[in-house]
Image (cartoon, rainbow, N blue to C red):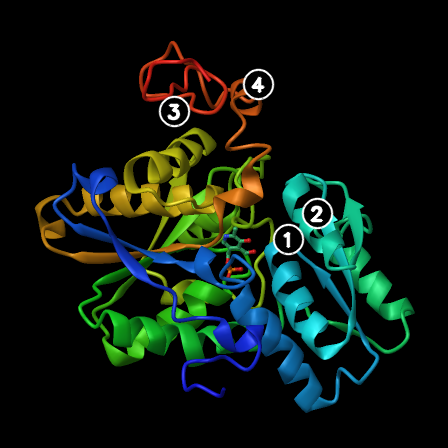
């Protein structure tokens, strides 16, 4: 029963994610806010877009051969994207993750049959124990392996230049600004390069967690403040990957954990969108950037990448105890996120659940 809308395999169902207007979370601004629902990709994140692409690029270059092993340093989502493609094409996977990443991501990768190696968070990138160094060492000693190297492999940003950019431009030619967090930088650099070529007035705004070096390097040309740990996953950096192109950006906006996690909860409670922590960072950055423009923000169409699904953070963002222990939720304090999961949820009949 071949049908023109039937995909031949899961990789072909990646992309064409919907764009949705954000209403209540954007009420105080005169700009228009839109979210690109990257969690609707088959593997649940924007990183599906590079998983298959990096593997197919490596196959074409002869860097990955039948029976090969895919190795990667990942905060989890790239691992899922690679594991999906590897499942379809029959490769084995080894992923190296820092220990701050959620149990959901680690278990998801293990469910694919991938070998998962956990390294300490917060060590310098060049430290032999960092997830980058450990992934490189594993790739060096594993026969017939391919290090996907999402940070420095420029096929990452090319995937977004060839696909995400044209997709966004055809869905929303009225776009005035794109807001996204940067982990490898592939999303904003590749997509942004395409959008600026098509429409040079488009502004590119990086959402950067407090504790990352991107804001310093963009603003001062070098790191000024020391790095510090933060709870948001997948974005912010302690080094500058080759996929970054900082001169292409128009602003870098710093956002702290409380702002990010509060907004991630608001996205669900006020917009019905179940997204992860870095989506919260990006929405807050969009609002701060629009505020900085004051009346010039009126009517601007700001598209915000919502990179992954909230289900990856059930044990953290959606766990009231974890939120309280980490100072991200205080039912008594105004402005703090609302407790929703274990406190006071009621049935329509007033019975306490
Ligand atoms: C949850 C999440 N958000 C955002 C990003 C950033 O995307 P990019 O690496 O393309 O900059 C990542 C990357 O791993 C991620 O996992």
Q: Tag 1's secondary structure?
A: loop
Q: Return the x and y of residue 143 as percentages of the image width and height.
A: 90, 75
Q: Return the x and y of residue 245 as percentages of the image width and height.
A: 46, 67
Which residue is at the far top? Answer: 332
Q: Identify the residue under disc 1.
A: 76
Report if the CB atoms under discs 3 and 2 are less than 8 Å apart: no
Report if the CB atoms under discs 2 and 4 are less than 8 Å apart: no
Earlier-in-chain disc, 3 versus 4: 4
Cβ at disc 1 under 8 Å from ligand 1: yes
Earlier-in-chain disc, 2 versus 4: 2
Quarter of the rendering containing residue 119: top right
Q: Return the x and y of residue 267 as percentages of the image width and height.
A: 34, 40
Q: Residues within 10 Å of mark 2 (few under 14, many from 20)?
A: many
Q: Identify the residue under disc 3.
A: 337
Residue 101 visible from this viewpoint: no
Numbered disc total? 4
Earlier-in-chain disc, 3 versus 2: 2
Report if the CB atoms under discs 1 and 2 are less than 8 Å apart: yes
Q: Return the x and y of residue 348 as percentages of the image width and height.
A: 32, 22
Q: Identify the residue under disc 2.
A: 106
Residue 152 horizontal side relative to residue 13, left or right: right
Q: Residues within 10 Å of mark 1 (few under 14, many from 20)?
A: many
* Front one among 256 and 32: 32
Q: Identify the residue under disc 4.
A: 325
Cβ at disc 4 under 8 Å from ligand 1: no
Vertical arrangement, residue 258 with respect to residue 332, above or below? below
Earlier-in-chain disc, 4 versus 1: 1
Label 2, label 4: how many angstroms apart (C-alpha)?
22 Å
Label 1, label 3: how many angstroms apart (C-alpha)?
26 Å
Label 3, label 2: how many angstroms apart (C-alpha)?
26 Å
């Amino acid at each position: 029963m071949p049908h023109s809308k039937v995909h031949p395999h899961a990789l072909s169902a990646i992309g064409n994610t919907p764009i949705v207007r954000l209403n209540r979370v954007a009420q105080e601004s005169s700009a228009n806010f839109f979210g690109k629902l990257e969690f609707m990709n088959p593997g649940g994140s924007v990183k599906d877009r590079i998983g298959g692409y990096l593997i197919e690029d490596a196959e074409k270059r002869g860097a990955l051969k039948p029976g090969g092993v895919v190795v990667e340093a990942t905060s989890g989502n790239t691992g899922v994207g690679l594991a999906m493609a590897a499942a379809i094409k029959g490769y084995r996977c080894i992923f190296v993750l820092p220990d701050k990443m959620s149990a959901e991501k680690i278990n998801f990768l293990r469910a694919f049959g991938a070998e998962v190696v956990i390294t300490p968070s917060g060590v310098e990138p060049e430290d032999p124990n960092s997830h980058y160094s450990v992934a490189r060492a594993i790739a060096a000693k594993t026969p017939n392996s391919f290090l996907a190297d999402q940070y420095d492999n420029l096929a990452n940003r090319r995937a977004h230049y060839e696909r995400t950019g044209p997709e966004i431009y055809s869905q929303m030619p009225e776009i005035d600004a794109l807001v996204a967090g940067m982990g490898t930088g592939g999303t904003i650099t590749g997509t942004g390069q395409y959008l600026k070529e098509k429409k040079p007035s488009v502004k590119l705004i990086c959402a950067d967690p407090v504790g990352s070096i991107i804001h310093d390097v963009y603003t001062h040309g070098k790191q000024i403040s020391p790095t510090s740990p933060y709870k948001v996953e997948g974005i912010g950096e302690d080094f500058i990957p080759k996929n970054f192109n900082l001169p292409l950006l128009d602003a870098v906006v710093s956002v702290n954990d409380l702002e990010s996690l509060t907004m991630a909860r608001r996205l669900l409670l006020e917009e019905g969108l179940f997204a992860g922590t870095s989506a919260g960072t990006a929405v807050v950055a969009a609002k701060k950037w629009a505020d900085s423009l004051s009346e010039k923000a009126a009517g601007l169409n700001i598209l915000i990448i919502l990179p992954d699904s909230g289900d990856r953070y059930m044990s953290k963002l959606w766990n009231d105890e974890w939120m309280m222990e980490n100072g991200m939720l205080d039912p008594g304090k105004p402005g703090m996120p609302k407790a929703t999961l274990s406190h006071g949820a009621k049935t329509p009949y007033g019975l306490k659940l």
